[in-house]
Amino acid sequence: MNIFKYVYPCTFLLLLVFFLSQCQLPNSEQELYGLWLGVHLEYQPNLPQPVLNEYRADGMVTAKRIGKEEKVYPWSLNGNILSVDTIDYDLLALSDDSLLSANNYRFLFRRAKDAPIEKTTEELRAYIENASWIDGQYKFHFDVEKLITEDGQGAINMRCWNIEKYGQYAFLYQNGYWENCNLDQSARVMQITKAAENQLNFSIWNETGKRELSCAKSTDKPNFEILKKERTFQRCHVYGLRGNLPAGKNYEGGGKAIEDYFYTHYKAPKGVKESGFITLRFVINCEGASGEFETLEMDANYKSYNFVPGISEQLMQLAKKMDKWIPLELDGQVYDERKIITFSIQKGAIKAIML
């Protein structure tokens, strides 16, 4: 048997496949047709800004920022340059499911699922609100304007929520933060893929991945007052964290009040001779509440070190009890703020406090 007549064609085909795999073919406009949901990837105080883009074969794209009026622009694709109106974007990646582009910012889009929702916005709200919906470890409690979530670790968060309908598609999104649902902000968008038969399904994605939630309606009515009281510390904004202003700037009585508080309440453990530095890092949110505590501990030679709990844990617990923080306000906007307090420890006692 002459096997070479089979080997040579196979080798040629393998080489052809390899060659084609090394060539980056230009994207076609047809790959963009349809509805996409996207956000900025850069984490700036006023971002992300979720937006819907529907690319159509007539050369027009409907762009709609969630919660805003839609706008229509001409679009075209020339190689890997996506032009929308007068702005050019580098098309970095395009697949059946995701689209990554860049201009001054980078944008990540996912294709909306083919899951039409026949209910109107008003019918959807009536179906969802004043009820609890459960998916395994996740629980979603919908008030008229507040969404309270519980996860498997017992964390309870509260957000404002609203619904966006685009044609037959429906999206649930965060609007403002829990204290002010009227802010011109939107984030954390999820597509509603089912709202019938006591089921509420979501398709959720961000820059790290996607997941599907299938929620069944609970027979128990949610007690919103108890849930709000048990709410875990949370930031007011998604990415609006300001950093590292002197701790005394936003505390009633200033830095001296902070120093007096620790010198008065801290008790050096008996028999402990440890020396070094302990830095507390935490966040003050727009309500003046504190959370997200962490410590950085070093010995006198600035090397990583673990102090006995009687020192480090005591300092952290004292910091958690401080209740005179003043929220940071800039240009009429209230922000979350990171605070840092460093303690110089000498033989178990506080030698100095650096704010």
Image (cartoon, helix red, strand yellow):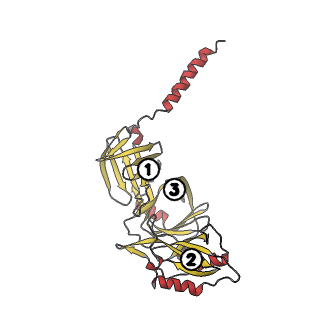
Query: In the rendered structure, which disc, 3 or 1, sits on the residue that comes first in sequence?
Result: 1
- Which labelled disc corresponds to residue 109? 1
Look at the numbered discs 2 and 1 and tell me whether their residues touch, using CB distance below 8 Å. Answer: no
Residue in the image at 35% along x and 54% along y: 64
Q: What element carries label 1?
A: strand
Considering depth in this image, is 343 or 346 the residue closer to the camera? 346
Real-space Cα separation, disc 2 to disc 3, in angstroms: 47 Å
Cα separation between marks 2 and 1: 46 Å
Q: Earlier in the sequence, mark 2 or mark 1?
A: 1
Task: Give the mark count.
Answer: 3
333 or 265: which is nearer to us? Answer: 265
The foreground one among 128 and 179 is: 179
| Residue 132 position in % (x across, y down) | 55, 66
Q: Which residue lies furthest to the top in this view?
A: 1
Q: Which mark is residue 343?
A: 2
- Labels 2, 3: front one: 2
Of pointers 2 and 3, the one earlier in the residue sequence = 3
Residue occupying the far front of the picture: 301
- The answer to whether any part of residue 232 appears in the image is no
- Residue at mark 3: 202
Does 341 appear above or below 47? below
